[in-house]
Image (cartoon, coloured by chain):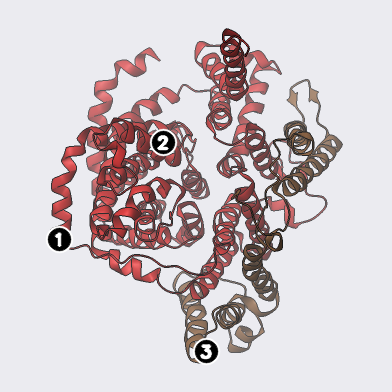
Chain colours: A red, B brown
């Protein structure tokens, strides 16, 4: 571990050189084409309900099987960007958050649109997104090789401890009832375990059917939960979609850009919050809310938040995009996705035969740095694309829902089928759709379910490998300070809701005891 | 969501649905534990058996869901407000039911023809559109998908008798 940090300056130089080389990979015009196609598709997906970031990437993933992994990941990550940008459009113009992390954008974005300032709101949102993503990408560029070098020393016990920490953080930091978080997570693990056990070759929970031999694919689950489920939920409000119109012309853009530097403190704070939340499994959604709340508290115009403050749009968007981008850091270096969409990207990497984790930086340098370079360019390209095409996307949303809804459902069905060319997957998608609808209404969180589904096998195998190494002795998880710290932290996170409730109850009792009875 | 809802709009209380869902979780965890105990969920000399992990997953699921069930059954804090309004549920089912039919049709007619029928019926039934609006969309969308998947990306989708007759 000591040698890792001592080599930091060398690593940074290395990183810069690799990054420049990565830009060279992008020079292939096909890759630039894929990037623009990806961004366009991504914004479209981000704008349409039911085809959100994770779902859209999941549907388009099988299409990329015929491309080289580098081109495929460039297109997929461009779709990811596009979706991040696109979520803001519906939030501002229609008061409908395109993504869960765009909810905070509606607080000030829609009022601004109502006052005829939609163009400013959108510009602020997109610029914030760009800045947040840029900062996070810088972090990615310089921190990733360090972490990767560090993680090369990880053994199965260390990996399992990081998985444990990830899952326990959902319990500790989630808003939902811990019982429900754990239930959703366990469901994900159980679904992941269905099929052939990789270690012993035994069939688990297949109940004699050939269809369950394959197990449940996370892509199908994502399309069902986030796609079909989302549409069912949207249908509660009926088929009407009315929104404000928006024109972004160059004048409005420059005017807003002149105003934004005033909020540089907000920008930095939001970017930091976003990067931190993205790396830990907090994610983009809490990041956007947290940074909105902080901006409201610390800004000069705090009281006017909610009525249409530019800063109220700038803060959450910066944080959400910083988080969305920095979620790629643990994904690439440790193989631990920080968000459902990163989980889908991780799944994609596995399908292409690439093993995310520290070895990726050693064995697949071209791929990794091509990806990181494409993130920079994709960010810039994305900003340009959205600034110029907002009216187009806004008008797409005006297509009546009774036309768009069946089309989206058909696309979801196609997406579910193309994963394994299996009809039963479409049926599973429907079932997951109903589950997604029920879960969202009852506040069962979906993110831990998806992450457990993606990581379940790996978590289990690292546990078993650790056990094989230690000959069945659980104390391997405290065998060195690193593992021990992580495991302890994980257990702390797990019991945090219980602990904080006990502390809160004790404090309340102390306080009421100090007040004389009436 | 917790606002008072007219009695015609009531379907079931959130508490009831919570009980159903957590009850299903409990049942599922029972199945999981049973099947994994069957293949062996013990710790042998060199580590856990194949069913070890999933068995304990099932056990945790059982404990957690039984708690949710108990809380909703006994506690006063259970949410007794309406789960979904009747009109809302109707709208949801208006999408879910055709979708189920659509998926069932895929098995017989292939995805392209089923999609055309699905889009057409949806637009006609829920959108109230006439044939002049319906036909272009219901035909062009599956056609576009056909070109994109069968010809461009070379990713085969389920096809039915009609495509077979056309030679695909």
The quadrant holding residue A518 is: top right
* Nearer the camera: disc 2 or disc 1: 1
Which residue in the protein does label 3 denote? B130
Where residue A37 appears, as percent x and y from the top left, is: 34, 63
| Chain letter belonging to callout 3 | B
Dot 1: element: helix
- The image shows residue A479, relative to residue A237, as above or below, that is above
Which residue in the protein does label 1 denote? A250
Dot 2: element: helix
In whole angstroms, how far apart are the C-alphas of marks 2 and 3? 48 Å
A415 displayed left or right of B99: left
In whole angstroms, how far apart are the C-alphas of marks 2 and 1? 32 Å
- The image shows residue A236, relative to residue A276, as above or below, that is below
> Do the numbered discs 1 and 3 sit on residues whose CB atoms are within 8 Å?
no
Check if mark 1 and mark 3 are on a common chain: no
- The image shows residue B144, relative to residue A206, as above or below, that is below
Which residue in the protein does label 2 denote? A278
Few, some or many C-alpha atoms within 10 Å of disc 2 (few <14, some 14-19, many ≥20)?
many
Q: Could one spot residue B102 in this view of the protein?
A: yes
| Chain letter belonging to callout 2 | A
């Amino acid at each position: 571990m000591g040698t890792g940090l001592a080599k930091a300056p060398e690593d940074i130089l290395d990183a810069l050189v690799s990054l420049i080389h990565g830009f060279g990979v992008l020079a292939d015009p096909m890759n630039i084409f894929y990037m623009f196609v990806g961004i366009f598709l991504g914004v479209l997906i981000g704008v349409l309900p039911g085809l959100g970031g994770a779902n859209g990437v999941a549907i388009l993933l099988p299409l990329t099987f015929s491309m080289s992994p580098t081109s495929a990941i460039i297109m997929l990550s461009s779709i990811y960007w596009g979706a991040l940008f696109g979520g803001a459009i519906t939030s501002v113009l229609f008061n409908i958050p395109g993504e869960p992390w765009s909810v905070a954008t509606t607080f000030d974005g829609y009022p601004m649109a109502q006052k005829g300032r939609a163009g400013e709101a959108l510009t602020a949102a997109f610029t914030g997104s760009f800045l947040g993503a840029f900062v996070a990408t810088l972090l990615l560029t310089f921190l990733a090789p360090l972490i990767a070098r560090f993680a090369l020393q990880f053994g199965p016990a260390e990996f399992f401890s990081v998985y444990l920490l990830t899952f326990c953080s959902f319990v500790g930091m989630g808003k939902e009832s811990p019982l429900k978080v754990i239930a959703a997570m366990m469901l994900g693990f159980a679904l992941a375990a269905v099929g052939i056990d990789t270690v012993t070759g035994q069939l688990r929970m297949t109940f004699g059917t050939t269809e369950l031999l394959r197990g449940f694919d996370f892509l199908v689950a994502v399309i069902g939960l986030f796609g079909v489920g989302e549409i069912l939920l949207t249908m509660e409000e009926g088929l009407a979609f009315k929104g404000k119109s928006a024109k972004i012309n160059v004048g409005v853009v420059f005017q807003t850009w002149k105003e934004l530097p005033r909020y540089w403190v907000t920008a930095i704070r939001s970017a930091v919050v976003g990067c931190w939340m993205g790396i830990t499994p907090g994610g983009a959604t809490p990041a956007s809310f947290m940074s909105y709340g902080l901006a409201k508290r610390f800004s000069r115009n705090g009281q006017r938040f909610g009525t249409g403050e530019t800063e109220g749009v700038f803060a959450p968007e910066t944080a959400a995009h910083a988080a969305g981008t920095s979620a790629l850091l643990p994904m690439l270096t440790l193989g631990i996705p920080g968000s459902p969409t990163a989980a889908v990207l991780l799944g994609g990497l596995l399908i292409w035969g690439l093993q995310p984790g520290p070895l990726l930086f050693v064995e697949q340098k071209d791929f990794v740095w091509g990806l990181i370079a494409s993130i920079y360019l994709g960010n810039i390209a994305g900003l340009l694309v959205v600034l110029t095409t907002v009216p187009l996307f806004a008008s797409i949303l005006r297509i009546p829902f009774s036309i768009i809804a069946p089309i989206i459902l058909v696309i979801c069905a196609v997406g579910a089928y193309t994963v394994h060319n299996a009809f039963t997957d479409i049926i599973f998608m429907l079932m997951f759709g109903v589950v997604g609808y029920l879960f969202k209404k009852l506040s069962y969180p979906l993110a831990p379910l998806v992450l457990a589904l993606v990581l379940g096998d790996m978590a289990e195998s690292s546990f078993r490998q650790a056990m094989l190494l230690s000959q069945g002795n659980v104390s391997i998880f405290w065998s060195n300070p690193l593992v021990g710290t992580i495991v302890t932290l994980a257990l702390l996170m797990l019991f945090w809701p219980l602990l904080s409730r006990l502390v809160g109850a004790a404090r309340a009792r102390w306080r009421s005891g100090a007040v004389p009875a009436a | 969501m917790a606002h008072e809802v007219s009695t015609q709009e009531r379907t079931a209380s959130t508490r009831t649905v919570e009980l159903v869902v957590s009850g299903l979780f409990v049942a599922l965890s029972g199945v999981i534990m049973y099947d994994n105990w069957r293949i062996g969920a013990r710790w042998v000399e060199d580590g856990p058996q194949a069913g070890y992990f999933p068995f304990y997953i099932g056990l945790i699921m059982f404990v957690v869901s039984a708690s949710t069930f108990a809380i909703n059954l006994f506690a006063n804090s259970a949410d007794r407000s309406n789960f979904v309004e009747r009109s809302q549920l109707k709208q949801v089912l208006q999408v879910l039911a055709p979708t189920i039919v659509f998926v069932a049709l895929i098995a017989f007619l292939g995805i392209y023809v089923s999609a055309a029928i699905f889009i057409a019926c949806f637009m006609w039934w829920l959108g109230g559109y006439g044939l002049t609006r319906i036909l272009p969309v219901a035909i062009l969308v599956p056609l576009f998908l056909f070109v994109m998947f069968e010809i461009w990306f070379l990713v085969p989708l389920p096809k039915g008798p009609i495509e077979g007759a056309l030679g695909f």
